[in-house]
Amino acid sequence: MTVSIEQIDPHNEPALRAWWEVGHAATAERPGKPWPVWEQSRVAMPRHHPEIGVSLLGAIDGREMVGAGLLTRRLKENLHAAMAFAWVVPGRTREGVGRSLVRELEVMAAGDGRTTVQGEAFLPPGGSAPAEPFAAAMGYSVASRESIKELTVADYLARRPDLARTVGGAADGYRFVTFDTVCPEEHVESFGRILGLLMNEIPLGELDLETSEWTPERIRAAEQRQADTGRHVLTALAIAADGEVAGVSDVRVDDTDHENAQVGITIVDPGHRGHRLGLALKMATHDLALSAYPSLVRVDTSNAEVNTHMNAVNDALGYRSIETLLELQKKL
Ligand SMILES: CC(C)(COP(=O)(O)OP(=O)(O)OC[C@H]1O[C@@H](n2cnc3c(N)ncnc32)[C@H](O)[C@@H]1OP(=O)(O)O)[C@@H](O)C(=O)NCCC(=O)NCCS
């Protein structure tokens, strides 16, 4: 193979653009919004992130980039783990380019002291894609199966009156607070407590990940990074009678794209379940996103197939499965 694997400097904009084009081409057949718009990547990829280390690889044949790799690792927790991604342009697959990229990403992860490498494979619902046998060939096992879901705004609006009736008075003991990205000061500590529950409460399957602590300072720094990259995290909090945050959900919209939004996190404190807070919170964030961005067309989300409660809420909202996501893992 004449292809060489090289590190790509994300500050070198033509090189970053070539890298972006590979991922764009390799994901073009997937439904939904599988790849960020260039303007988003152009701004976000070179930016220093104090919590995530990012390395890019290019597979270069002559003067052409035919494959792209990405390694991300958390710098504050999960120091044992890294995430590896590879994309190969259609027309240059099955030549060993993907294998060379993943091998190099694993060497980089190991060099950084990481012992677990995780990845993702997206498949059509009920079907397969090259990423599935590729992952198996590279020694990755399936740690969790997730469903990628999409909601059209038209479907949501058609269902909204029924949904409001479903919530009824179930959440009457709670107050709802919504905000764009920046949590009101009086709730920030309690918000951090509930964020700390996230890793324990979302079904991770066999994924080897640990919990994290969210101090107000860390939350403020994360909010600032979202603002700096032009991302709006439209958030709803359910506040219990004692003033504590009982649940949170958010929908994210980028300044570069006012038609597509993504659900970020959703969690209800185990002590406050059974009051339809999941549904009420999601309605609050979807309503907020729609009033702020009337041009919104669709929202996507993903959850573990075993997460029955969240799936029931998403089904009620009108979400439909568009892809299966395999969460992959390999111990080095
Ligand atoms: C998955 C992907 C990266 C594979 O890249 P590639 O360069 O074709 O992979 P390689 O040629 O190195 O294949 C390595 C091995 O994986 C397996 N494999 C890869 N593609 C396969 C396919 N379509 N069918 C069956 N096995 C496959 C084979 O065992 C192959 O070895 P072999 O050719 O000697 O039999 C590429 O298809 C792609 O870019 N897909 C879209 C993006 C994506 O899904 N990325 C992975 C998740 S981040």
Image (tube, rainbow, N blue to C red):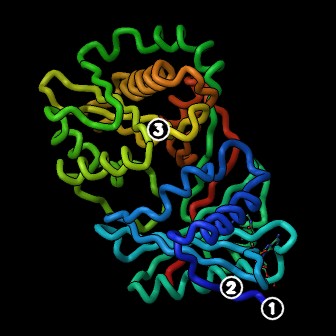
Residue at position x 78%, y 61% from top? 129
User: How many residues crowd around disc 1 within 10 Å: few (fewer than 14), some, or many (20 or more)?
Assistant: few
Alpha-carbon span between mark 2 and mark 3: 35 Å
Q: Tag 3 or tag 2, which sits nearer the N-term?
A: 2
Q: Which residue is mark 1?
A: 1
Circle 1 — which element? loop
Marks 1,2: beta carbons within 8 A = yes
Classify residue 294 by image quadrant.
top right
332 vs 216, left or right, is: right
Residue labelled with disc 3: 252
Badge number at residue 100: 2
* Amino acid at dot 1: Met
User: Percent from the top left, x then y, of residue 38?
Assistant: 62, 53
Three-letter code, disc 3: Arg
- Seen in the picture, residue 279 relative to 7 is either above or below; the reply is above
Local SS, label 3: strand
Q: Is residue 317 left or right of residue 226?
A: right
Q: Residues under labels 3 and 1: Cα distance? A: 42 Å
Quick check: is the Cβ at mark 2 less than 8 Å away from ligand 1?
yes
Location of residue 259 by image quarter: top right
Give the secondary structure at mark 2.
helix
Residue 290 horizontal/vertical position (percent):
51, 21
Residue kind at label 2, given as amino acid type = Ser
Q: Is residue 147 above or below residue 120?
A: above
Quote the CA–CA distance across marks 1 and 2. Answer: 10 Å
